[in-house]
Image: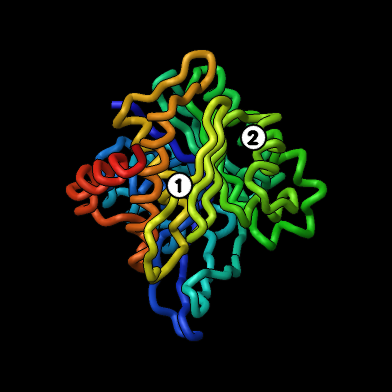
């Protein structure tokens, strides 16, 4: 089977509602994606760093219990594993506070031997952090050289806005590494100050031809060289939206593997490919919004085929 690699930060999410902690979960954008993929039987490898401390031990055990390979997880002695406090508002959207104490030398693990059939996803603050930038690009260059499909999720939040001007060049360099960019409407509003999906695509297309914009209840906008479409999403009453985008990414990757979507010199997606990517993404995202976990349950794989089949039929 094709291998999926995720490159990103790992945190312990402590979730608050009405000023009280209600759950503690291993988290981080890429971790959420990979756990859901592992739970639907996709071979998943996490490229990250955690401390040699109790929090790191808890995260490592969680990864192993959920079937993720830890071959490329670097454990550091200087510093501590990161913690994120997630505060849910009345709509169950989250605002975050982060507590981080990393070593001076970052991301010191081995680079995988990527191959053409592999998929690599990266993003969030890890994708723009100057402390890991040089090493991050070593991974991206190796994947690019191998012909691996690269997916980028900018996850560009409000806390990044004070450095927006300096980060635009880094973000666009990441767009250029990617074969597919998937971000939220909030991400692109923060990056470019644009709310019109077509205007956003005009910006991103200068670097990457394939773009998916998720816009919550307003639906999903997909853009390729020869395909633009707006998909409706089901109306739900979410429990938490923390893992929504991360699991949309998991759905994209699951569809790439299920339908054996590969690239030659570049990733060219047909109308049917776009429908598969989007319908899978919607199902994964909708599922995770109905629980406090940031990833789908293991039982979800038994329901997925029927759910996606109905949605694909409706899209056609």
Callout 2: few (<14), some (14-19), or many (20+) C-alpha neighbours within 10 Å? many
Local SS, label 1: strand
Marker count (numbered) = 2
Q: In the rendered structure, which disc, 1 or 2, sits on the residue that comes first in sequence? A: 2
Q: Residue 290, percent across and down?
A: 34, 66
* Mark 1: few/some/many CA within 10 Å (<14, 14-19, 20+): some
Badge 2 is on which residue?
A: 175
Q: Position of residue 74 (x, y in %)?
A: 48, 43
Image position of 275 (left or right of 121): left
Residue 235 drawn at (x, y percent): 39, 63
Q: Is residue 122 visible?
A: no
Residue located at (41% from left, 60% from top)? 26
In the image, taking residue 208 as reference, residue 46 lies left or right, namely left
Q: Which quarter of the rendered picture does the N terminus lie within?
A: top left
The residue at 45%/73% (across/down) is 15
The residue labelled by disc 1 is 231
**At x 46% / y 27%, what residue is drawn?**
112
Which label belongs to residue 267? Answer: none
Nearer the observer, 49 or 307? 307
- How are the colours assigned in the image? rainbow
Q: Are discs 1 and 2 less than 8 Å apart at CB?
A: no
């Amino acid at each position: 089977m094709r291998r999926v690699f995720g490159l990103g930060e790992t945190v312990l999410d402590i979730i608050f509602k009405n000023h009280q902690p209600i759950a503690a979960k291993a988290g981080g954008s890429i971790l959420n994606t990979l756990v859901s993929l592992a739970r639907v039987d996709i071979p998943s490898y996490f490229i990250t760093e955690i401390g040699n401390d109790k929090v790191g031990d808890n995260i490592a055990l969680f990864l192993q219990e959920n079937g993720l390979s830890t071959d490329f997880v670097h454990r550091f002695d200087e510093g501590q594993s990161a913690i994120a406090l997630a505060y849910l508002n009345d709509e169950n959207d989250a605002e975050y506070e982060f507590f981080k104490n990393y070593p001076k030398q970052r991301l010191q693990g081995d680079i995988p031997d990527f191959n053409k059939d592999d998929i690599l996803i990266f993003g969030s603050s890890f994708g723009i952090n100057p402390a890991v930038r040089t090493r991050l690009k070593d991974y991206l260059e190796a994947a690019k050289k191998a012909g691996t499909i690269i997916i980028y999720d900018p996850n560009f939040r409000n806390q990044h806005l004070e450095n927006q001007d300096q980060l635009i060049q880094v973000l666009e360099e990441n767009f250029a590494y990617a074969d597919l960019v998937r971000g939220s409407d909030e991400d692109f509003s923060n990056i470019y100050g644009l709310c019109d999906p077509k205007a956003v695509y005009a910006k991103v297309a200068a670097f990457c031809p394939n773009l998916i914009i998720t816009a919550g209840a307003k639906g999903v906008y997909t853009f390729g060289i020869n395909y633009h479409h707006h998909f409706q999403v089901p109306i739900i009453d979410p429990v938490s939206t923390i893992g929504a985008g991360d699991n949309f990414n998991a759905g994209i990757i699951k569809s790439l593997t299920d339908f054996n979507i590969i690239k030659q010199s570049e990733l060219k997606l047909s109308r049917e490919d776009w429908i598969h990517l989007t319908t899978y993404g919607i199902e994964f995202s909708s599922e995770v919004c109905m629980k406090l976990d940031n990833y789908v349950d293991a039982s979800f794989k038994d329901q997925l085929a029927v759910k996606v089949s109905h949605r694909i039929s409706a899209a056609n």
